[in-house]
C-alpha cells in the first residue's frame, strides 16, 4: 500500500515535470509592443494594455476581448460576456489618409468554447470604399482568417478572400485593395496582427493554447487622427466594443481619467454618443456631437484650445447662460464657433460675437476681447 502511494506520488511528480518542460519561456509570450524585463513582460514606454497580449499607444481608441472572455469597450467599460459563434465585434468609419475618402469597417469575432470557457478562434472583416467611378456604390473586401489547431497543439493560419479567391492563402504576402495595403503578420508570440494602414486601423487575434502564459484574445485599435465615427445603435444590437448607454459624459471623465473637460468632450464625441448628454445639456447635444465628430482633428484641437476658458471660467459660463443654471446657451455659443472654424461659415462667427455682446460685460471678462476683435471675414 505504501509503495503504491509512493508510485502515485512519483507519477504526479513526473507529470508536473513534463508539464513544466513543455511550458515556454515567459518572455516568449510577451505581446506586441512589450519587452521582457527581469523575466516579466512589460509594455514599452508610452504604451498601455496587457503586456502578455498587446500593448497600444496611449490616446488611441482601443477595444479588446480577453480570456473567458472579459471585454473592455472603446469607452473603457469592463464587462464579463459570454458569446459563442460569430458576433459583431466592432463597426465604424474612418477617413483614408491618402484620399480622405471613407473606410467603412466591420469586424466579426468567431468564438469557440473550450473546457467551459469562451475564446476567439478566428475573425472576419468587411472593408468598404466608395467607388469613385460609380456614384453611390462601394467596393467591398471580405476577408476571413482561420486558425487550424494541429494535433501537436501548434496553429496553422490561412485566410480566404470570398469574392476574389475562395481558396486558402498563406499569411506571407500583403493584400492590395483599392490602392490600400493590408498586412497580416504572425508575431513570435503567436499573435496575428492585421493592419489597414491607409485607414488607421489595426486589429489582431491570439486563439487559445494550452500554455496559460499566452493570453488569448482579440482587439481592435483605431488611430484617432483617422477621425473615427460610429453609427447610432440600440442597446440590444450594437457591436460589442461600443457598449452604448453605459456612460454619461460625467463619468467618461472618471473612467478615462480625463479631468480636462475639453479632452473628455472630444473623446465623448468620438465614441458614438450622439444621444448622450453633454454636461446635462438637453438641447443642441446632437448638433454639438456632429460638429466635434466631423471637424478635422487639427482644427478641432485648435478650436477647443481657444475655447478652453469657456469651460473653466465660471463667471463667463454664468453670463453666457443668462444665469439660468443650464449650459444650453454655452453650447449654442460653442456650436457657433465650431460652425465658423470647422465649416467656414462666417455667420457662426457673427452669432458667437453677438451672444457675447448681448449677454456679457466684456469689461469684466478681458479674455473675451479676443473674440470681440475677431474679423469674421
Image (cartoon, helix red, strand yellow):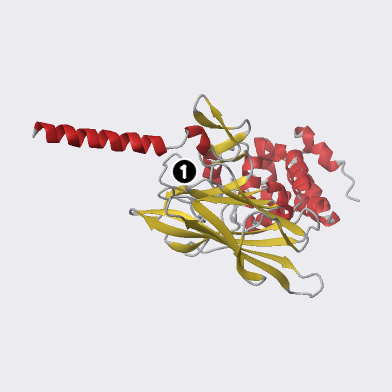
Give the image quarter of residue 166: bottom right
Q: Residue furthest top?
A: 38
Give the image quarter of residue 157: bottom right
User: Is residue 346 or residue 206 the one in the foreground?
Assistant: 206
Residue 145 seen by the camera: yes
The residue at which mark 1 appears reads as: 215
Tell me: residue 231, above or below residue 329: below
Answer with left or right where residue 371 lies relative to residue 273. Answer: right
Mark 1 is surrounded, within 10 Å at the Cα level, by few (under 14), some (14 to 19) or many (20 or more) other residues, namely many
User: Is residue 367 or residue 318 the one in the foreground?
Assistant: 367
Tell me: residue 206, above or below residue 176: above
Residue 72 seen by the camera: no
Q: Secondary structure at mark 1?
A: loop
Coordinates of residue 200 in the picture (x, y in percent)? 70, 51
Taking the spot 72% from the left edge, 65% from the top edge, the residue there is: 129
User: Is residue 193 or residue 97 the one in the foreground?
Assistant: 193
Coordinates of residue 199 in the picture (x, y in percent)? 71, 55
Coordinates of residue 30 in the picture (x, y in percent)? 53, 37
User: Is residue 69 or residue 101 the one in the foreground?
Assistant: 69
Answer with left or right where residue 33 lies relative to residue 298. Answer: left
Coordinates of residue 350 in the picture (x, y in percent)? 83, 52
Amino acid at each position: 500500500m505504501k509503495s503504491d502511494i509512493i508510485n502515485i506520488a512519483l507519477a504526479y511528480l513526473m507529470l508536473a515535470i513534463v508539464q513544466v518542460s513543455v511550458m515556454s519561456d515567459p518572455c516568449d509570450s510577451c505581446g506586441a509592443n512589450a519587452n521582457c524585463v527581469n523575466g516579466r513582460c512589460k509594455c514599452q514606454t508610452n504604451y498601455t494594455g496587457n503586456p502578455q497580449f498587446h500593448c497600444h499607444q496611449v490616446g488611441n481608441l482601443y477595444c479588446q476581448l480577453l480570456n473567458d472572455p472579459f471585454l473592455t469597450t472603446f469607452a473603457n467599460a469592463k464587462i464579463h460576456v459570454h458569446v459563442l459563434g460569430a458576433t459583431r465585434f466592432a463597426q465604424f468609419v474612418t477617413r483614408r489618409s491618402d484620399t480622405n475618402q471613407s473606410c467603412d469597417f466591420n469586424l466579426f469575432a468567431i468564438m469557440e468554447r473550450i473546457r467551459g470557457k469562451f475564446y476567439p478562434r478566428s475573425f472576419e472583416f468587411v472593408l468598404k470604399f466608395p467607388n469613385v467611378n460609380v456614384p453611390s456604390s462601394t467596393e467591398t473586401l471580405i476577408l476571413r482568417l482561420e486558425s487550424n489547431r494541429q494535433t501537436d497543439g501548434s496553429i496553422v493560419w490561412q485566410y480566404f478572400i470570398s469574392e476574389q479567391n475562395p481558396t486558402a492563402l498563406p499569411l506571407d504576402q500583403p493584400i492590395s485593395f483599392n490602392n490600400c495595403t493590408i498586412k497580416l503578420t504572425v508575431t513570435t508570440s503567436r499573435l496575428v496582427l492585421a493592419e489597414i494602414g491607409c485607414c488607421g486601423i489595426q486589429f489582431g487575434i491570439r486563439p487559445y493554447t494550452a500554455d496559460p502564459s499566452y493570453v488569448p484574445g482579440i482587439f481592435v485599435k483605431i488611430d484617432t487622427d483617422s477621425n473615427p465615427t460610429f453609427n447610432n445603435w440600440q442597446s440590444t444590437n450594437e457591436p460589442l466594443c461600443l457598449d452604448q448607454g453605459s456612460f454619461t459624459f460625467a463619468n467618461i471623465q472618471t473612467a478615462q481619467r480625463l479631468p480636462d473637460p475639453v479632452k473628455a468632450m472630444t473623446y465623448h464625441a468620438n465614441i458614438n454618443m450622439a444621444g448622450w448628454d453633454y454636461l446635462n445639456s438637453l438641447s443642441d447635444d446632437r448638433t454639438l456631437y456632429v460638429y466635434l465628430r466631423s471637424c478635422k482633428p487639427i482644427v478641432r484641437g485648435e478650436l477647443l484650445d481657444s475655447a478652453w476658458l469657456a469651460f473653466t471660467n465660471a463667471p463667463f459660463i454664468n453670463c453666457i447662460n443668462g444665469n439660468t443654471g443650464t449650459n444650453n446657451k454655452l453650447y449654442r455659443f460653442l456650436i457657433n464657433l465650431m460652425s465658423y472654424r470647422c465649416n467656414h461659415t462666417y455667420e457662426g462667427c457673427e452669432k458667437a460675437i453677438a451672444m457675447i455682446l448681448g449677454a456679457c460685460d466684456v469689461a469684466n471678462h478681458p479674455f473675451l476681447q479676443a473674440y470681440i476683435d475677431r474679423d469674421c471675414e
